């Protein structure tokens, strides 16, 4: 009988922590993917693996973390934490090597003092008013449990098998999106303006659902995109707050497609 050779599964390092989430339900998202093996590692340990040597056995890096923020710092929390120089060098080396990255949901808020990191991901979620690309910006907005229609944009391998439109109920962000520098994949039917979101800065000050005095301008309705970052493919998907989305078949297809696409070297 001839030996049948099977393709090895795609190996993913999944960085988590920094934002509450249902770990069991999130793990089930990856367990549903044939031919993909996910290793979940909490921050800050995950950061120690983000370099070419430690990532040798992994085909892709999935970011579902929110590092660089200390929510226990008392008044003014979250305090911003500078990334270790070794992490910055290691992460850049991964991208120069061509290691693919899939960033999900709250990863957009990670490492707020590391400007290059935001450029790589294609946007920024700000917990406090700050500076983005040399200009003053208000803190970002959030809205929980929003019912909306996700619409695909154009054709792309990440969208294979995904219908042109599909419903989701999830948290959305009114954030800084570098729309001119990304290849769009998904847009939301929701209204991205001041009246439909709450201030993140007021929320961390104890005013959870408040927008008083927060006059954020209208934002982008893009909720998914790709970027070429140095030698690496990167996909960002804003959906992903909880089990209702983890379990959605279209979301699962998007994440699986994204992992497969970024794992292929050009």
Image: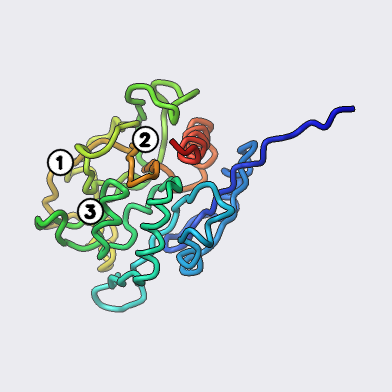
Where is residue 138? Give x, y as percent.
15, 56
Q: Residues within 10 Å of mark 1 (few under 14, many from 20)?
A: few
Which residue in the protein does label 2 denote? 147
Residue that appears at 24% across and 74% down: 76
Mark 3 or mark 1: which comes first in sequence? 3
Measure the C-alpha gap from mark 3 to mark 1: 11 Å
Which residue in the protein does label 1 denote? 218
Secondary structure, mark 2, is strand
Q: Nearer the viewer, residue 201 or 13?
A: 13
Vertical placement of residue 95 versus 184, above or below: below
Measure the C-alpha gap from mark 2 to mark 3: 20 Å
- Residue 106's tag is none
User: Residues at badges 2 and 1 in contact (C-beta under 8 Å)?
Assistant: no
Which residue in the protein does label 3 denote? 140
Q: How is the image coloured?
A: rainbow
Quadrant location of the C terminus? Answer: top left
Q: Residues within 10 Å of mark 2 (few under 14, many from 20)?
A: some
Left or right relative to 213: residue 99 = right
Vertical placement of residue 225 versus 109, above or below: above
């Amino acid at each position: 009988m001839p030996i049948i050779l099977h393709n090895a599964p795609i190996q993913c390092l999944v960085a988590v922590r920094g934002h509450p989430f249902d770990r069991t339900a999130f793990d089930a998202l990856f367990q549903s993917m044939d031919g993909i093996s996910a290793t979940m590692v909490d921050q800050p340990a995950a950061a120690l693996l983000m370099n070419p040597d430690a990532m040798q056995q992994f085909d892709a890096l999935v970011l579902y973390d929110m590092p660089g923020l200390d929510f226990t710092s008392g008044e003014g929390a979250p305090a911003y934490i500078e990334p270790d120089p070794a992490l910055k060098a290691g992460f850049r080396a991964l991208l120069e090597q061509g290691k693919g990255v899939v960033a999900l949901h709250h990863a957009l808020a990670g490492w707020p003092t590391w400007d290059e990191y935001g450029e790589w991901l294609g946007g920024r979620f700000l917990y406090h008013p700050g500076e983005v690309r040399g200009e003053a910006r208000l803190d970002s907005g959030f809205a929980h449990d929003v019912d909306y229609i996700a619409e695909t944009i154009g054709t792309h391998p990440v969208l294979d098998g995904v219908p042109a439109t599909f419903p989701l109920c999830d948290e959305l962000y009114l954030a800084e999106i570098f729309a001119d520098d990304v290849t769009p994949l998904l847009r939301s039917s929701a209204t991205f303006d001041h009246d439909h979101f709450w201030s993140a800065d007021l929320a961390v000050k104890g005013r959870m659902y408040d927008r008083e005095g927060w006059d954020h301008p209208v934002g982008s309705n893009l909720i998914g995109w790709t970027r070429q970052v140095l030698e690496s493919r990167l996909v960002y998907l804003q959906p992903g707050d909880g089990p209702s989305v983890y379990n959605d078949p279209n979301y699962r297809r998007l994440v699986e497609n994204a992992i497969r696409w970024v794992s292929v070297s050009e």
